[in-house]
Amino acid sequence: MGFNLFNFLSQDIAIDLGTANTLIHVKGKGLLLNEASVIAVRQADHQIVAVGNAARTMWGKTPEGILTVRPMKDGVIADFELAELMIKRFIKQLQLRQWMHPRMAISIPSGITEVERRAVRDSGEHAGARQVYLVEEPMAAAIGVGLPVDEPIGSMVVDIGGGTTEIGVTALSGLVTKISIRIGGDEMNDAVVQHFKKRHSLLLGDLQAEQIKMDIGSAYPYKSDKTMSVRGRDLISGIPQTVEATAKEIQEALEEPVLAIVEAVRLALEKTPPELSADILERGIIMTGGGSLLRGIDVRLRQETQVPVSLAEDPLTAVVRGVGLVLDDIDRYQKILNLRLRR
Ligand SMILES: Nc1ncnc2c1ncn2[C@@H]1O[C@H](COP(=O)(O)OP(=O)(O)OP(=O)(O)O)[C@@H](O)[C@H]1O
Ligand SMILES: [Mg+2]
């Protein structure tokens, strides 16, 4: 390919537009943004009050007239207008050369519809991209953790995000098996909220539930007598109340979403052609995404599938690193992007 000044000067950007977190990698500069996928706006005119982590801290605490919104749900755009505002603001924060329209690669869940794909593409274009590439999340995760996706070798990744769990088997630049379920960390948080409602008649906020999950939650009956003081609003009396929660009860509360993930991995293994299964059995499953940090989920998966399981080094950034690598070498990954090479 000839030297192209436009491509040389432009700052290509890779985006992992996640349900919980948005990460942006800029070519030649690295990971420049890692923020919660949250936007707070004034209800009357949709003026931005805050975005990212700053907006997340306002979750459930905003005064009347201010909305705190997570525009992504289950891995896809749930609120177009606010998603676009959020992305634009994030990109503005990068302070790229204003006059250059970048190429953008954005990760998407593997199970999404054509309409949902279009919505992501449109958002990228409205945010100023001159070209938008879409990379399926399990493929991005596999590339991000350095699996040999373009070789005739089967590799399995399990990415547990906030909104979805994506399971993919890669070989010869394709996703031979892919399963996407709309269950992830958000459902685990919901399960904790429901548990406290039922067992303790206590109303918790989402952020509190998430903290409990991270602090004492687990996917495996490990030996722990850890407890945690949890403060919430008593559903009956309406006044603040404190209860002592045990690791065991949180593990039980998380069982439903955890089991759904285990079942999905089992199904993916069943659907995988035997030659590739042999590779996976030998090389193991790699886990990425924030949900893979749930205590014991790797042990649990290994126990239930009899396949070795390991956790990626930096599970929360695997997808964006993968998308960044695709952008760095579009020629190499053209098959993944379903592109025909223009030479
Ligand atoms: N230590 C931990 N234990 C359990 N869960 C965790 C931990 N750390 C982060 N998480 C969960 O990981 C999820 C966020 O992960 P991640 O950033 O990979 O999701 P995402 O990419 O935004 O979502 P998706 O890919 O589904 O669109 C949240 O639900 C968060 O609660
Ligand atoms: Mg993700």
Image (spheres, helix red, strand yellow):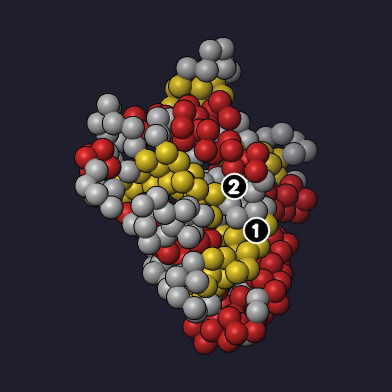
Q: Is mark 2 within 8 Å of ligand 1?
A: yes
The kind of secondary structure element at disc 2 is loop
Say which residue label 1 marks: 180
Q: Which mark is residue 75?
A: 2
Residue found 22% across the figure and 47% down from its top: 3
Residue found 52% across the figure and 73% down from its top: 171
Question: Can you give x and y, in whole percent of width and height, for residue 158 in the image?
Answer: 56, 66
Image quadrant assignment for residue 271: bottom right
Marks 2 and 1 close (CB-CB < 8 Å) = yes
Instruction: Please state which amino acid type lies under the numbered disc 2.
Output: Gly
Tell me if 323 is positioned left or right of 200 in this view. left
Instruction: Please state which amino acid type lies under the numbered disc 1.
Output: Ser
Front one among 71 and 28: 28
Tell me if 282 is positioned left or right of 3 in this view. right
Q: Residue furthest top?
A: 44
Q: Which mark is residue 234?
A: none
Front one among 251 and 153: 153
Question: Can you give x and y, in whole percent of width and height, for residue 228 in the image?
Answer: 56, 57
Residue 308 position (above or below residue 25): below
Question: Can you give x and y, in whole percent of width and height, for residue 257 in the image?
Answer: 69, 60
Give the class, few, some or many, for how many residues have Cα within 10 Å of label 1's Cα (few <14, many ≥20). Answer: many
Residue 190 position (above or below residue 125): below
Residue found 50% across the figure and 48% down from its top: 134
Residue found 28% across the figure and 48% down from its top: 27
Whole-Å distance between the Cαs marked 2 and 1?
Answer: 10 Å
